[in-house]
Image: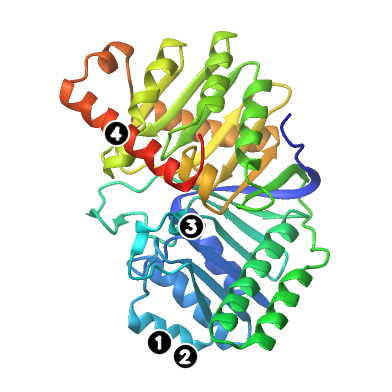
Amino acid sequence: MAQEIDYAHDHQVRLLQGAQELFPALIAAMDEALSDIQFETYIFDFTGSGAAVAQALMRAARRGVRTHLVVDGVGTGRLPQAWADRMHAAGVLLRVYSPLGPLGLMLPHRWRRLHRKLCVVDGRLLFCGGINVLDDFHDPNHGRLTAPRFDFAVQATGSLVVPASDAMEQLWWRMQAVRDARQRRLPEALQALRAASAAHHGSVAQDTAPPVRAALLLRDNVRHRSRIEKAYRRAIGAAREEIIIANAYFLPGGKLRRALVLAARRGVRVRLLLQGRYEYFMQYHAARPVYGSLLKAGVEIHEYAPSFLHAKVAVIDAQGARPWATVGSSNLDPLSLLLAREANVVVEDAAFALDLRQRLEYAMQHEGRQLEPARYENRSWRERVLDRAAFVLMRLALWLTGNRY
């Protein structure tokens, strides 16, 4: 049975679409910070509007705000030296999660990445979602985009801020302990581990807006290995009218696929908004072999066309008695569900669910193209070979990590 979610009713949650909505809210919160900023992201890119976020972090650090920034060693890699120097001079404390050694990603344990995008300001305000520090119109591999990247985040207050802050604090001090231990600074390493175990923030200030029911779901490789996937399966299993999922890298395991198929067969309208543009070989081709069984069951697949789809969101029964929605960093693929650190916010609120549904409905109707079963079955032999090769490579990679999916 799926693990129960610890919902609370004291939250205010605001949906943000794209960096164009997230970054102004994030910068405003940083400029008002009084005590501390905790920030984690997979990609920190300084092109365009990304530089404005970096400037806000530095402004906060200069006025004495404790500013912790953690970036992933693959997603971000090595920061440009000029920016790293400026951040250090301003007082921003920076760590790189699992930097790659000489063998890079050839070692399977290096595939466990920090993929969550979290920011907590003064222990009271949380930002969580799928949006990296990356300009909406810029892609590091493809250059200038003609349309903004499609992605979401939330801004939230309430008791879910505490576990987010605690998780980031614990990771920070564990990284510090590992660094001290490698440098044979054992007393400092023990002190850092004690700080990690003691990391906890007190109660948070509440806003005056009507509260909503929400929770934070974290995925790691120790205590919460399958919490996000189980939450999806529970919500899909309870669906009565409609399921809409928008996901950038969609390669669900057998249990999740079966849940979607069963929902469609019992009359639930299931729609998937997936990546329609070629971004990476594995991302594009490994997903296609699972489309067949979904299409045969009546699941609708819409491919997003104007730009890169990077969203990791879902909304279920938005117009029903028990609306459910999630916004976060977790893809429905093995890298997110089996290997990476991820964070999703789940919300049970009609207004929030309807807002997200409206945005996804518009994207499907005006910016996507439905994949008809006949078009899928008639794809060329070359596409079929590439699809199967990518799928086999993905399964082989999972076998090397010791995971079944």
Instruction: Give the alpha-carbon distance from disc 1 to disc 2, as whole Å.
Output: 6 Å
Task: Estimate the x, y position of residue 83 in percent, counting from the top left.
Answer: 38, 80
Instruction: Give the alpha-carbon distance from disc 2 to disc 4, as whole Å.
Output: 44 Å
Q: Which amino acid type is shown beneath numbered disc 1?
A: Asp
Q: Residues within 10 Å of mark 4 (few under 14, many from 20)?
A: some
Q: Which amino acid type is shown beneath numbered disc 4?
A: His
Q: Earlier in the sequence, mark 3 or mark 1?
A: 1
Which residue bears the numbered disc 2?
89
Which residue bears the numbered disc 3?
113
Residue occupying the far bottom of the picture: 89
Q: Nearer the viewer, residue 164 or 72?
A: 72
Instruction: Give the alpha-carbon distance from disc 2 to disc 3, as whole Å.
Output: 28 Å
Query: What residue is shown at x 39% (from left), y 71% (from top)?
Result: 51
Looking at the image, residue 150 sits to the left or right of residue 343; the answer is left
Disc 3, disc 4: CB below 8 Å? no
Q: Residues within 10 Å of mark 1 (few under 14, many from 20)?
A: few
* Residue 118 visible, this orientation: yes
Which residue bears the numbered disc 1?
85
